[in-house]
Image (spheres, rainbow, N blue to C red):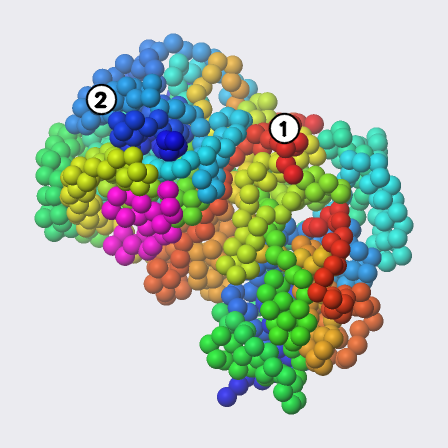
Amino acid sequence: MSGRFVRVAEKGRRTFAIHIDGQRALAAEGDTLMVALLTSQDALRDSEFGDGRRAGFCVMGACQDCWVWTADGERVRACTTPAVEGMSIVTRLADREGLWPRL
Amino acid sequence: MAATVIVIGAGPAGVRAAQALVEAGLRPVVIDEGRRDGGQIYRRQPEGFTRTYEALYGTEAERARSLHRDFDALRANIDYVPDTLVWNIEPNAVHVVSGTHHRKMVFDALIICSGATDRLMPVPGWHHAGTYSLGGAQVALKSQGCAIGSRVAMMGTGPLLYLVAAQYVKAGATVSAVLDTSTFAQRVRALPQLLAIPSTLTKGIALMRVLKDARVPVHRGVTPVAIEGTPENGVQNVRVKQANGATLHVSCDAVALGYHLRPETQLADLAGCEFRFDHALQQWLPIADEDGRSNVKGVYLAGDGARVRGADAAERAGRLAALAVLTDTGVTRNEDEANRLRLQLQRFTRFAAGLRAAFPWPAQFAAALPDDTIVCRCEAITAGELRRVVNEMGAKEANRAKAFSRVGMGRCQGRFCAHAGAEVIAAEARVPLEAVGRLRGQAPVKPLPMAIATQADMETSE
Amino acid sequence: MSERADVIVIGGGIVGTTTAFFLRRRQRSVILLERGLTGQQASGVNFGGVRRQGRALQQLAMSNRALETWRRSRDLLGEDVEFMPSGHTRVCYHAHDAEYFHRYAADARDHGLDLEVLDGAAMFRRYPHLGREVLAASVSPFDGHANPRLAAPAFGRAASRLGARVVENTEVVRVDKEAGGFRVESATGGIYRAEQVLICAGAWANTLSTQAGEPVPLVARGPQMAVTEPVPYVFSTSMGVYTSIKKESVYYRQVARGNIVLGGGPPGPADPVTRRASVLPENTVAQLAQFVRMVPAMRPLQVIRVWSGVESYLPDSEPIIGPSSKVDGLFYAFGFSGSGFQIGPGVGETLAELLDTGSTPIDLSSFSIRRFQRTSSTQAESVTSETSP
């Protein structure tokens, strides 16, 4: 499993499963959702305005670049949200069929 | 009847403010957005992580330990409200939200210790996935044990540039290059001011040694040309122009970018504080007296959230603001200690001026940004679009330009585009930066979930 | 030395800029004097609804004229003010309001506004995202919305290109009648002369109308606005709740970029002197509750900003439009009570016609300033079900 972020410390923590775009991935206890996503893949979302994939920026809850959609159609800010077992995140707008709005 | 004091922020300034209030017998409320205390520079790692204070905070290990330990000791005597965002302020009350629960908390005195975030100058391609702020690169390592990439280029200026690069090297991450827009000559000229805090010089030299030993290329006097990448894969390399005019390509899969810090002043703005254009800093800052009193009675400002002077200054400013609260509410008066703190802070002010001289904010880059450079990352608005509204619509002031171009309308509400945006407007309109003004602040300070509204909210409104 | 034109327009909001625009198309010379920058006040902060539905019947003629202008705005102005013919639908929660929908639809048809009223299964089929408390929906398919931050300034620039003299950063302090017309003086001593003067200075018009001996009970209020982050574009119709319960009366529109603009509920404080208006935190929270009630699917979304501004209201929530009752050649258009944006270009076109030719087929009698002349007092504030778009 390789992504954008590289774990250089605190390795060997207990892992648990999350889903990213329907695929199973492993997160480690203590990961923020941002780290859980970016240690498995390259990006968190698509820019709304056509300039490509985004992967966050400030990592401290200021820039608001890391808001992601959950598979339940909820919104979470990945860098300030702890990753939790069972989380399922959709990072590609094209895959959001039926994601939001929920009727 | 004891005054109700609310402290916003549990970083160095907020913790020391709370401590001073508790010492005087008060029970302050300490509200913090984060799950844990420490702010950014002394951010605590998640429970169960194993790195030592030395590994995490280097030369500042003892300060970090002291801050965390002292805050832990305070817990019994404060109302600690973590994981909670102050999203709005009215006279004598803050409005907070935690998850989807919201409430209003009244205060007699408010000490805002909201900290800072990175100050950014755009470069073409800085929107590519894999570009982070220097502070962000640091938090990823400090708080999550991650490097932002497998080959990280660090670009910008300021002491943080070298600090983060050295921290990455020590942690075993690969730093492709350190690209500093400032020159060695600028640093030498600033030496007298930097000597206000002599220990920083030795620390700086030690950082350079770490980089040298790891053979990390360090280039000074560079001009960023572009962060090259693709929409799908993000950052692939960085191109700069060196001091000698030659072009340098740095292969990387991540870039950490930053030019010092800028105070997070949104809460001061919402509290009604007046701002003044600081010519030395070329920024709008909330007005505060030496002790942190704003122009609003009962509202005090401390730490990097008012004026960036670093964590050590923030601890002192937090304490000084608390002393001001105690004096102003008639609880106690300690002029001797206040005087000591004021004197100490003057040294930090001098030092901060030295840092600015040594590592200047490259205002001149704004005018030279190619038209297709994104200035507002949130809304993907380019420098060319911003220039167009200046020229075709006569928008020479920040709010007018925002209304027409959307720069500043995105989720971050101008945090990362306002400074450079103003420089672009000033250059294009050929007016002084001060004349461009500053973006009007509005609630919510950060995104507010619609889910906070409950049945009770439907019933209780008039 | 003074500047001179056929008409001086005082106030550079949507009414002033469109009046100047239409006057130029009639070859009348015009000087527009704006204290700040065009479109900065109510015209720039309002919801942006371009809505005929819901207006008092006597407004519909000008409102229809306005819609024609909005539809042609890109060609007329040479720029995009983001008019979207999304349709406007108002919904209700109470049976008596549903009954009113049918009555209004019948009356409005006579005034050139065709509405369709839906309820029950047909309504939820058309609008599956509506909360289940909604009883009925009244649909105006050709209404829509536009970008209030862009519109008045764009009309101002178009008027300039046609030869209007648009003077910003110029506050008018005196309007005096003299032989041959008027002498208008600015705060910095600038003098402007014209045969006719139009006062369309929004919340500040009362100062000038009082100078002319025609004070009116104008009250400033702040719209409570908010906007979400950009989300996928799904709500193609602008919607609002019709109700006599103030806190329920919320409305939204989604723009092409994906943000959803939110407004409504009780207004907040606005001060014409400081030109500051605020959004009360409790109003924001209460408003969000009502949105989730109207459209439960909004619940996951994030609000990223609130704003307000200085709108001005008259006791009967109808504007003053037309000639002064005291001074020949002086005209007024202000007090749009939160509903001036859509109709603005229609008012501008009509005023241009009136000032140019001396008459207009549009009946302005119900908007006359005379109606406030009886005594200082008791215009009973009529209960308005919908004070905004």
Q: Secondary structure at mark 2?
A: helix
As shown in the figure, which amino acid type bears the numbered disc 1?
Ala
Q: Nearer the viewer, mark 2 or mark 1?
A: 1
Q: Amino acid at mark 2?
A: Arg
Using the rendered view, name the quadrant where residue B59 is placed: top left
List x then y, in percent, for residue B376.
44, 47
The prevailing secondary structure element of the residues shown in magenta is loop
Judged left or right of residue C249, residue B123 is left
Where is residue A47? Give x, y as percent.
50, 38
Q: Residue at x 58, y 36 (%)?
A: C285
Q: Residue under circle 1?
A: B456
Chain letter of the residue carrying label 2: B
The residue beneath circle 2 is B65
Question: Does residue B215 appear in this view?
Answer: no
Picture coordinates of residue C372 (x, y %)?
Answer: 74, 66
Q: Left or right of C201: which side holds B364?
A: left
Are discs 2 and 1 less than 8 Å apart at CB?
no
Badge 2 crowding class, 10 Å Cα cut-off, few under 14, some 14 to 19, many 20 or more, is some
* Image: magenta residue range: B274-299
